[in-house]
Amino acid sequence: MANTTLGSKLLKNEAIRFVFSAGAGFLVDMGTFSLLYRNFLIEKTYSILSFTVRNYTLSFSISFFLGVLTNFLITRYFVFSESKLPPYKQFLRFISVAILGYFANLFVLKFFIQSMQLDPLIARPSAALSLFFASYFVHKFFSFSLSLRHHAAGTPHPKSY
């Protein structure tokens, strides 16, 4: 009985649900990155539309957006399900934040690999984890329009247009 109560309390905690959601996206991202980098994109560079792209950058780009898609779906239906924004607005906001996150992650990833000489398989999760906390607040207040005032008071959030 105590385990059920504890489990119910944990599931009611939005931050815990967000950690779960982000964790699922993280696992998809890291698993895909590792598979692509180690097994499929084994050349050091690739030519894409006359640009030379390093294998870790291409692996990161694909894995990041698969992780984002996973994270959005879980976040939308499990974490911030009380949001009154239409799903398409949530998705557009989420993707716009993800694009900023993509470039922030890419910058940190390249810094870790090129300046600190970290292995890409160590640098990738390090870059992702270094930006985790900012992601929670940006998605809560921007992507899903849940203000602290309405959330803390337990009052329904007014419909946003």
Image: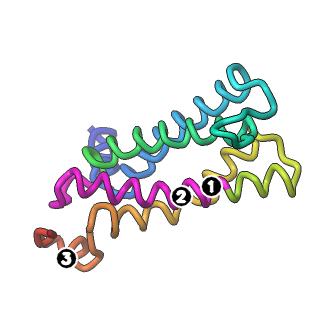
Per the model, the C-alpha gap separating discs 2 and 3 is 30 Å
Total numbered labels: 3
For badge 3, the amino acid type reads Ala
Residue contact at pointers 2 and 1, CB within 8 angstroms? yes
What is the x, y in percent for residue 33? 63, 33
Mark 2, residues whose alpha carbon is within 10 Å: few (<14), some, or many (≥20)? some
Q: Which residues are magenta?
A: 80-106
Q: Answer yes or no: do the residues labelled 2 and 3 have beta carbons within 8 Å?
A: no
The image shows residue 87 at horizontal and vertical percentages of 21, 51
Identify the coloring: rainbow
Vertical relation: 21 (above or below) 156: above
Query: Quick check: is 64 in the magenta stretch?
Result: no
Amino acid type at mark 1? Asn
Q: Looking at the image, which residue is at 17% across and 55% down?
A: 86
Q: Quadrant of the C terminus?
A: bottom left
Quote the CA–CA distance across marks 3 and 1.
Answer: 34 Å
Q: Which residue is mark 3?
A: 153
| Sequence-earlier tag: 3 or 1 | 1
Q: Main secondary structure of the magenta part?
A: helix
Q: Would you name the residue on which mark 2 appears?
A: 101
The residue carrying mark 1 is 105
Q: Earlier in the sequence, mark 2 or mark 3?
A: 2
| Disc 3 to disc 1: CB gap under 8 Å | no
Looking at the rendered structure, the kind of residue marked 2 is Gly
Residue 149: x percent and y percent? 25, 79
Write down the quadrant of residue 35 in the picture: top right
Secondary structure type for disc 1: helix
Q: Please report the residue visible at 33 percent of the width from the left and 42 percent of the height from the top.
A: 74
Distance of mark 2 from mark 1, alpha carbons?
6 Å
Residue 12's x, y, as percent? 27, 53
